[in-house]
Image (cartoon, coloured by chain):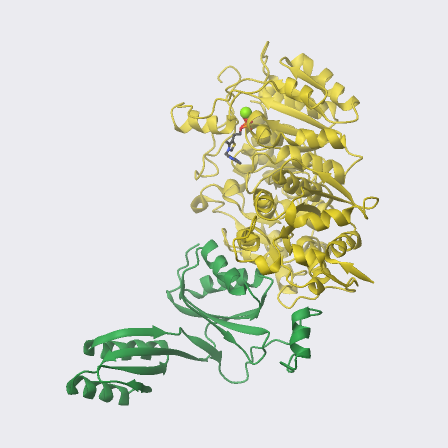
Chain colours: A green, B yellow
Amino acid sequence: MTSQVDINKVTVVALVENEPGVLNRIASLFRRRAFNIDSLTVGRTHKPHISRMTIRVVAGPEYARKIATNLEKLVNVIDVRVLDNEPHVERDLALIKVRNDDANSRNTITEICDRYPARIVDVGPKVAIIEMVGTEEILEEFIDEVRPTGIVEMIRTGVVSMGRGTRIHDTNFTRRDLAKIQDELSAGGNGNLI
Amino acid sequence: MKLTGSEIIMECLLQEGVHVMFGYPGGAILPTYDAMTKYDDRLHHVLVRHEQGASHMADGYARATGEVGVCIATSGPGATNLVTGLATAMMDSSPILAITGQVPIPAIGSDAFQETDVTGVTLPITKHNYLVTDVRDLAYTMKEAFHIARTGRPGPVLVDVPKDVQLAQTEFEYPEGEIVLPGYHPPSSAEESEVSDALRLIEESERPIILAGHGIMMSGATRELRELSERAQIPVALTLLGKGGMPEDHPLVIGMMGMHGEASANLAIQEADLLIALGMRFDDRVTGNLKTYALNARKIHVDIDRSEINKNVRADVGIAGDLKTVLLQMLPKLKPKSNPDWIGRIRDWLEDSSERDILNYETPGRLLTAQVINDIWEQTQGEAITVTDVGQHQMLEAQYYPHQRPSTLLTSGGLGTMGFGFPAAIGAKFGKPDEEVWAIVGDGGFQMTLCEMATAAQENVNVNIAIINNFFLGMVRQWQELFYEKRYEATPLFNPDFCKLADAYRIPNRRVTKRDEIADAVQFARDIDGPTLIEFVVEKEEMVYPMVPAGADLHDMKRRPKPGEG
Ligand SMILES: Cc1ncc(C[n+]2csc(CCOP(=O)(O)OP(=O)(O)O)c2C)c(N)n1
Ligand SMILES: [Mg+2]
């Protein structure tokens, strides 16, 4: 069903078990249900058996909720939240390799970087790598400014998000009996399994 | 005590109350077959002739009993042969557990002999699946698999067990207590506000109708459904898989809805001011064109799967919960109500459509499928478990065999899997040995899994096969007649002599070509304790009406022709 809600980017955050194949299950779900995903990032949390995903969708909140209810059906997905109106911090990181072979472009780049939370992390005679962190919008803006000097390579991590304040998105689960968790524990690995 | 992985599988099956499993051996599952020798007295293995048959048998068993059906196959081709059965079970929420052998762990990923990424292949067609990589995880995984298969919205679960895990040993202890999974919490009851919202809509309605689906059976809510319907005088339309959810001779049951549903049910839906959808999912075969579907109606939708709510049809009150629990929350506060005008109106439609019933035709020398189904119904006093295949005969079964009890019509609804009927009937009979079981199959679909006649004969399963032989892929031919100007490409069938085929399998059989032979043949089949086959040679070019063409408005039905017209 299409919704009348204005089409915007919505963020869905999911806590998932850090198990082989989980990303595959989620990717398969998106493909199967023909969900249109703008970006998806996965990373570890402070608990080694739990990963966290940030999924950005170009859609109304209703669509995001549809994605959430489908994600929740996956056994390895522990908890899903739609960051709708909730105030949250979001960050995207880009590594941008730019042309750096004349004084003019060098100056332009330094000048642009000074105005943004961007750093030049590698400089050579021909190219430099800029690291830029910020919201998706600021990144877009920054990239547009840098583009004329000549981007030769670029990678973005995709957005990660976290709700502001004391709204904690975490889970307290332990999977019982699983041999590999026991092994990890007995190997002195991650004692913070709760 | 230390047991091997294979023995652990057997022990877990016993712990879960399994008595029968359907399977086919091969290299990667051989250790488990070897372990079976020690469990022969408690766990019966049914050797099928094709793994697809095993998956449908497990499914038929599950649908008939509500318990988890178990099938077993080897790695690679054995496992891929289960795929159709898993997809079928997934679409119809049937709890089955598939155990597959896998190449030994060190060989995984090397394109070893008979290696297939089975968890990858079956990922979208199972509720969940596992690749067990440590024998110490096996018992827990098995318990989890059963739990996931049978709880919430049930579905197929696959456990892939590498050969070396089957051989490895570990201390066996069946995990005690409830399974707690961090990411798996099927909803149960409704919020109080949802209950009162639903009750308010019911009170305010003048033309309410209940749409009862498969969930009624799976939640065991037949009594609650009936009470809701009777107390508030709400007519009940059934989905194909909802048949039997309320006795079909009940005056408030107005028939099956959807593409080949009764005109009365479909018209009632389009005229209703309230739909109360219970354990059904607004499949496109049920709604027709969504843009014109039940436009006058507010909707209450109760389903155990939250993602079904607002998926196809927007709910005014959407309740994710176990149907029986939710109805039990509603019933104490439900005020009695009557809707005589509304019910009268539906009655008129009902009479209008049954008047054209082809049962009343005089058809000397010809046999119509509806007559066959009707007469089987009469002979079996409407009490048999019927398991259909897919096609015209399936829809005619649904129209002409009224079911009184839950889970007595087993049919592949969501996937529409030809080849399902006969093996599923074998599975159903294993699950319900005291019930009379009929497989009602088309000449096309039967040929997809007829190799299981050998299984039926070897096990002497008392299943009666009724082949509705129209020498056509009838349902496809019907579409060709209606929408492709009768260009019968690839639908006429050159069939074997089904009776001779049955003879070859040593299955007693009859051929019926006239109506007055039906009763006798059906009785012949019922009298034999073992598989039987009756071939009913019916009209070649029958049509199933009413029919809502795919994508058309639900009220835009092609009606049954008047006698003499068709
Ligand atoms: C496995 C599979 N292949 C193809 C179809 C498409 N299909 C639906 S009904 C039908 C014809 C069935 O013919 P038959 O078994 O003779 O039954 P009839 O319609 O004649 O009663 C076909 C081919 C299907 N449902 N399943
Ligand atoms: Mg046919």
- Residue B102's spot in the image, x, y percent? 62, 53
* Label tally: 0
Please indicate whether residue A3 sits to the left or right of residue A100 in the image: right
- Residue A35's spot in the image, x, y percent? 44, 58
Please indicate whether residue B323 sits to the left or right of residue B524 in the image: left
- Residue B303's spot in the image, x, y percent? 61, 54
Given residues A80 and A186, the one toward you in this image is: A186
Task: Please identify the residue farthest to the top as the structure is shown.
Answer: B364
Residue at position x 20%, y 86% from top? A106
- Residue B467: image quadrant is top right
Residue A107 visible, this angle: yes
Given residues A161 and B20, the one toward you in this image is: B20
Residue B98 visible, this angle: no
- Residue B19's spot in the image, x, y percent? 78, 45
Q: Is residue A96 above or below residue B76?
A: below
Q: Quadrant of ligand 2?
A: top right
Q: Is residue A61 above or below residue B492?
A: below
Q: Is residue B230 above or below residue B315?
A: above
Given residues B52 and A37, the one toward you in this image is: B52
- Residue A122: image quadrant is bottom left
Looking at the rendering, in which quadrant would you find the N terminus of chain B? bottom right
Please indicate whether residue B476 sits to the left or right of residue B165 in the image: left
Residue at position x 80%, y 35% from top? B434
